[in-house]
Image (cartoon, rainbow, N blue to C red):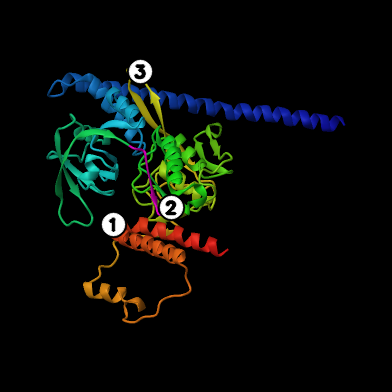
Amino acid sequence: MKRYMMAAIGGTLAGILLTSQVAGPLIADEADRKKSTYEQLDLFGDIFERIRSQYVEQVDEADLIESAINGMLTSLDPHSSYLPPRDFKDMQVQTRGEFGGLGIEVTQEDGFVKVVSPIDGTPADEAGIQAGDMITHVDGEPVQGLTLDQAVELMRGPVGSEIVITVVRESVDEPFDVSIIRDTIKIAAVKTRAEGNAIVLRISSFTDQTFPNLESGLQKAAEEIGGMDAVSGVVLDLRNNPGGLLNQAILVSDAFLDKGEIVSTRGRKTEDSERYNATLGDLAGGKPIVVLINGGSASASEIVAGALQDHRRAIIVGTKSFGKGSVQTIMPLQGDGAMRLTTARYYTPSGRSIQSLGVAPDIIVEQQPAPEETAETTKRRQRSEADLRGHLDNDSLTEDEKKLLEEERRLQEEAAKKRSEDYQMSYALNILRGLAVLKKAN
């Protein structure tokens, strides 16, 4: 027993000794790191002072410091940045659903400004700006070499003033100029309409108004159709939606899920991780859902699409989404400015990250018009037994059944016409019609 006791004590002493021997270098390393940091800060102060006193022209010290802060943040990733007081105020207004500008969501790529998506009904949208466009010049001034915030500042100006941006587009051989009149951007976060017995919910952004707009719009459209029982399904259009508030993405996802995880966020520290779960209640009453996405669908849009896809609650149609799988936290700073800092990555319910990969649709559908038809092919297509002289009447249908059949054909023809206007939407509506037919058969 004594031998075991002494061994235990010996082990404890050895452990204490070993700990002391390891702790020494750890403390030294920490001290060295602090010393190095202080030396770098001294270097920064030295450079700042030399620029302030010796640069060929007098400089604004506040601008120098602001640029240094922004440079530090933008070196981390494309979404971290410093928000001066005016930009911070604009951002707060924007998340409430109203702001001034052109109406485009942008990021930075290869030194140029890349359009993530134009916002529906804004000057940029009406001028024909498209997701994926690269902006190289603003009023003749090159944007290469500028930070994203500096480039955005060039595009800001008084409401009613004109701006000319130079655009490079993949499908166009040469850069071209686009003239846009700046305006106050009022965003209808959700636009709702009925398409036959289907409800289309077009979500253009995730602001404070998104879920309330969706809830009221869905209810109103269902009433127009004749109640939720008469609704064949819902199309959730998230194309060219640049994202927005995380809590709104969670609410929209929860609107169509009864249970299960919606999204999780994982930060640098384990204790900073969060999981968000759905609550009981499906606003669509279990009706089929088709979600439309494309390369302009980013961030909050991808959270919704990913959640509904993982839970097999919706069919995802379109093209691969943008692939922004990070969460930014806005931190107010002294002087009324703020810092936008990437603090977490988000993961879909299955645990996958869409960062730089995007959400892959279940059915890939490119946006393209239906093949053009000549007058001759249209004429041939429209000929039927009913066009023949002396054809027999159909005696198997009542007058009411004939009217119902004619109404169904009318809706099908209207859907066919819409293919040239919005092929992806037409495809989504056709999926819902097909699912409705299968449901009737069962």
* Residue at x 56% of width, y 42% of height: 261
Describe the element under mark 2 as helix, strand or loop. Answer: strand
Residue 204: x %, y % from top left: 35, 42
Judge the density around disc 1: few (<14), some (14-19), many (≥20) Cα neighbours within 10 Å: some
Badge nearest the viewer, 3 or 1? 1
The numbered dot on residue 198 is 2
For the residues labelled 3 and 2, say whether their Cβ atoms are less than 8 Å apart: no
The numbered dot on residue 334 is 3
Quadrant of the rendered image containing residue 116:
top left
196 on left or right of 142 = right
351 on left or right of 417 = right
Q: What type is the residue that disc 2 sits on?
A: Ala
The numbered dot on residue 170 is none
The residue that mark 1 highlights is 421
Badge nearest the viewer, 3 or 2? 2
| Magenta stretch holds residue 194 | yes
Dominant SS of magenta comes to strand
Decide which of 164, 218 is in the foreground and name it.
218
On the rendered image, what quadrant is the C terminus found in?
bottom right
Decide which of 317, 137 is in the foreground and name it.
317
Describe the element under mark 3 as helix, strand or loop. Answer: loop
Going from N to C along the chain, the mark reached first, 3 or 1, is: 3
**Disc 3 and disc 1: Cα gap in Å?**
50 Å
351 on left or right of 47 = right
Q: What type is the residue that disc 1 sits on?
A: Glu
Decide which of 7, 60 is in the foreground and name it.
60
Badge nearest the viewer, 2 or 1? 2
For the residues labelled 2 and 1, say whether their Cβ atoms are less than 8 Å apart: no
Judge the density around disc 3: few (<14), some (14-19), many (≥20) Cα neighbours within 10 Å: few
Q: Which residues are magenta?
A: 188-196
Residue 143: x %, y % from top left: 19, 39
